[in-house]
Image (cartoon, rainbow, N blue to C red):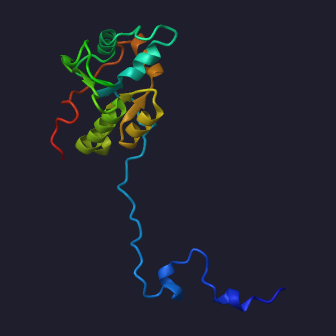
Amino acid sequence: MRPQDPAAARRPPRNADPARTSAFAGMALPPQPQPGPRRPPPRPNKPWTEPEHVVVDGRNVQRAMERGAALGAVPTASLVARLRSAFPPPTQVELVLDGHRAGGPGGKVAPGFSVTFSRERTADAVIADRTFDALRELGPADAWSVLVISDDREVQDQARRNGCRAEGTVWLMDRWARAGAAPALGNRPALGNRPAR
């Protein structure tokens, strides 16, 4: 057995708190970082219930519907009609589109259905705001009543971090295939229009 190195015995252990070692004694050290606010974890095993508010990544869904067809083959008006058939009132639906309105539907187009243009921002940023509003206004438990539809992984991840559900366009097209089969339950005003709790 090799004798222990006396210098090693005096050396502070690795990962030691520098404030407790003689070399740093008396020095003003920066504060330790504090953990941020806890986000509610995703709840993939929660039983399915009809969403009360649906936020749709419009261009993302349009591009998915146009696969194999010409660009622009699915105009916004057609997408609105199909979404209305899939999510009839009292479900609140918001279709979020990139850019500025240049013809076609915009604003409140039907009871419980609105079309929002992101203007100088991206649709992803607007959708992120909606999911944050859901968490802030509804709380972690009821944010689950909000559904985001997009194939964009970052959009889905942001929604789930804020306690909302997220589904892709394959799920939406299956929903269209059986539109009206599942009852829409509950009714709430649009996100962002409620007083904070």
In this view of the protein, which residue sits in the foreground, 52 or 172? 172
> At which x and y percent is residue 178?
40, 12
Q: Is residue 50 above or below residue 194?
A: above
| Residue 174 in view | no
**Up-down: is 180 above or below 16?**
above
Location of residue 186 by image quarter: top left
Residue found at x 41% / y 66%: 33
Q: How many marks?
A: 0
Residue extending furthest toward the right: 1
Q: Which residue lies most toward the bottom here?
A: 6
Q: Which sits in the foreground, 121 or 128?
A: 121
Q: Who is closer to the viewer here, 71 or 90?
A: 71
User: What residue is drawn where x is 42% and y is 40%?
Assistant: 43
In the picture, measured across the screen, residue 84 lies left or right of residue 167, that is left
Q: State the image coordinates of residue 50 (x, y, percent, origin top left).
A: 33, 26
* Residue at figure coordinates x 53%, y 86% from the top left: 23
Give the residue at x 50% y 13%: 67
The answer to whether one can see residue 177 in this image is yes
List x then y, in percent, for residue 149.
39, 26
Look at the image and tell me in which quarter the N terminus lies. Answer: bottom right
Res 145 quadrant in image? top left
x, y percent for residue 134: 27, 39
**Image quadrant where residue 177 sits:** top left
